Image (tube, grey):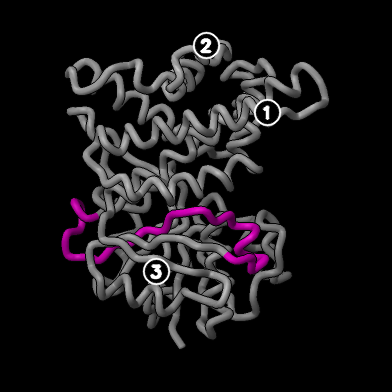
C-alpha cells in the first residue's frame, strides 16, 4: 500500500483517486485556495460536488493549510492544478515537497519561447528543480468516465524510467491502461494541441445549431480531418516525433464530445464574441483558450523567422484570430489540405 497526495481538487486530479484507491492505496486530496468549498463538502459527505461522484473510501481530504500533514509518509504526488496554476505550483508548492518523491502532473499545456519553440510544463519544472523527478499524464481520458471506471488508455511521460515504472505500478488498473514514453516534449505537445483543435471542431456544432436543431457531422468531420493535418505539421515544425499524433487524435476525439472546450467552440459557432463567451462561462478556467493563444503566437513567430508559412495552419490561426481579435467565425475551408 502506498500513499498518494493529490494537490488540486479539480475533476481530473480527483478522478485519479479512483484507480489508485481501487489498487488499495491511500489518496490524500488537497484543495488549492480555489477548492475550499469542494474540500469542505467532501470532508462532510465524501462526495465531490464538481466531479459529481462519491469519492472512494480511501480518500482523505485536506485544505491547503493542511498540506504538510497530507505529505507525511507520501510515496507519490499528483499535481492536479490547471494551466493557470502551474506557476503558483512551481513557485509556492514545489519547494515544500519532499525531494525524493516523484511528482506527476495531469495538466496539459505548453509554454512559448522567444524563438517560436514551445516547452512542456515538465521542462519548466525541471529547469527550476533539476534534482526532482517529474512525470506527466496525457491521452484520451475524461475525468468523469475515469471515475466511472470506463476503460481508458493513456500515456505517462517522463525522463526517468524508474519513476515511470513506479507510477505505472501504482496507478494501472483493470480499466486504466498506461503506456510509457521518455519523449516528454513531443508527447506533451501532442496532447496539449488537442485542446485547441477540439475547440476548432466544435465551431461546426455551433454553426449547425445556429441554423437549426439538426446537428450535422460532415462539417465536424472535415474540421477533425484538418485538425489532424495541422497537428502533424506542428509536431514536425517543433521537431517532435510523428508517432505522438496517435495520443493527440484520441484525446481530440473524446474532447469534442463534451465539456467546457466543446461549449466554447459551440458558442463561437453560434455567433458569440470572445467577450460574450467569457461572460457566459463566468470565470471557468479554459485550457483550450490558453493553448490556442500560445500555439498561435508560436506559429506567427516561426512565420516571422521563415520557419513555416501561415497557409499551413489556417484552422489554428482562425481560432487565434477569434480569441485575440474578436474575429467572427468564418471557417477558411478553401485553405484546407
Residue drawn at x 42%, y 19% as measured from the top left? 314
Give the secondary structure at mark 3: strand
Taking 83 as reference, is 52 left or right?
Answer: right
* Magenta residue check for 281: no
* Magenta residue check for 139: yes
Q: CA distance from mark 1 to mark 2?
A: 18 Å
In the rendered image, which residue does mark 1 sit on?
Answer: 205
Residue drawn at x 62%, y 30% as measured from the top left? 220
Q: CA distance from mark 2 to mark 3?
A: 41 Å
Mark 2: few/some/many CA within 10 Å (<14, 14-19, 20+): some
Residue 270 vs residue 88, the one in the foreground: 270
Earlier residue among tags 1 and 2 = 1
- Which residues, given as a range, are shown in magenta? 126-151
Taking 290 as reference, is 236 left or right?
Answer: left
Percent coordinates x, y for residue 274 in the rendering:
57, 19
Q: CA distance from mark 1 to mark 3?
A: 38 Å
From the viewer's perspective, is residue 280 above or below residue 136? above
Give the secondary structure at mark 1: helix
Earlier residue among tags 2 and 3 = 3
Circle number at residue 327: 2
In the rendered image, which residue does mark 3 sit on?
Answer: 77
Query: Is residue 85 visible to the viewer in this orientation of the structure?
Result: no
Percent coordinates x, y for residue 125 in the rendering:
26, 53
Residue 273 vs residue 166, the one in the foreground: 166
Taking 272 as reference, is 241 left or right?
Answer: left
Amino acid at each position: 500500500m502506498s500513499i498518494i497526495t493529490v494537490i488540486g481538487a479539480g475533476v481530473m486530479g480527483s478522478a485519479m483517486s479512483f484507480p489508485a484507491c481501487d489498487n488499495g492505496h491511500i489518496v490524500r486530496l488537497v484543495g488549492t485556495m480555489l477548492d475550499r468549498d469542494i474540500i469542505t463538502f467532501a470532508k462532510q459527505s465524501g462526495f465531490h460536488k464538481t466531479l459529481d461522484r462519491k469519492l472512494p473510501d480511501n480518500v482523505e481530504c485536506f485544505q491547503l493549510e493542511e498540506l504538510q500533514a497530507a505529505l507525511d509518509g507520501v510515496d507519490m504526488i499528483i499535481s492536479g492544478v490547471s494551466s493557470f496554476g502551474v506557476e503558483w505550483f512551481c513557485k509556492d508548492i514545489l519547494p515544500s515537497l519532499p525531494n525524493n518523491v516523484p511528482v506527476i502532473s495531469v495538466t496539459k499545456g505548453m509554454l512559448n519561447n522567444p524563438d517560436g519553440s514551445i516547452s512542456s510544463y515538465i521542462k519548466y519544472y525541471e529547469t527550476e528543480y533539476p534534482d526532482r523527478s517529474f512525470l506527466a499524464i496525457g491521452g484520451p481520458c475524461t475525468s468523469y468516465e475515469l471515475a466511472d471506471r470506463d476503460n481508458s488508455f493513456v500515456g505517462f511521460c517522463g525522463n526517468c524510467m524508474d519513476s515511470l515504472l513506479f507510477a505505472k505500478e501504482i496507478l494501472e488498473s483493470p480499466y486504466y491502461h498506461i503506456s510509457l514514453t521518455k519523449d516528454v516534449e513531443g508527447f506533451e505537445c501532442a496532447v496539449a494541441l488537442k485542446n485547441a483543435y477540439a475547440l476548432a471542431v466544435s465551431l461546426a456544432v455551433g454553426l449547425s445549431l445556429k441554423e437549426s436543431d439538426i446537428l450535422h457531422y460532415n462539417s465536424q468531420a472535415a474540421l477533425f480531418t484538418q485538425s489532424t493535418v495541422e497537428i502533424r505539421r506542428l509536431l514536425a515544425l517543433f521537431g517532435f516525433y510523428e508517432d505522438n499524433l496517435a495520443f493527440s487524435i484520441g484525446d481530440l476525439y473524446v474532447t469534442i464530445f463534451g465539456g467546457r472546450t466543446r461549449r466554447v467552440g459551440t458558442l463561437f459557432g453560434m455567433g458569440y464574441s470572445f467577450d460574450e463567451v467569457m461572460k457566459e462561462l463566468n470565470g471557468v478556467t479554459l485550457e483550450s483558450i490558453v493553448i490556442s493563444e500560445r500555439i498561435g503566437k508560436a506559429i506567427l513567430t516561426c512565420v516571422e523567422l521563415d520557419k513555416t508559412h501561415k497557409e499551413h495552419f489556417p484552422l489554428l490561426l482562425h481560432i487565434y484570430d477569434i480569441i485575440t481579435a474578436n474575429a467572427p467565425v468564418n471557417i477558411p475551408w478553401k485553405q484546407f489540405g
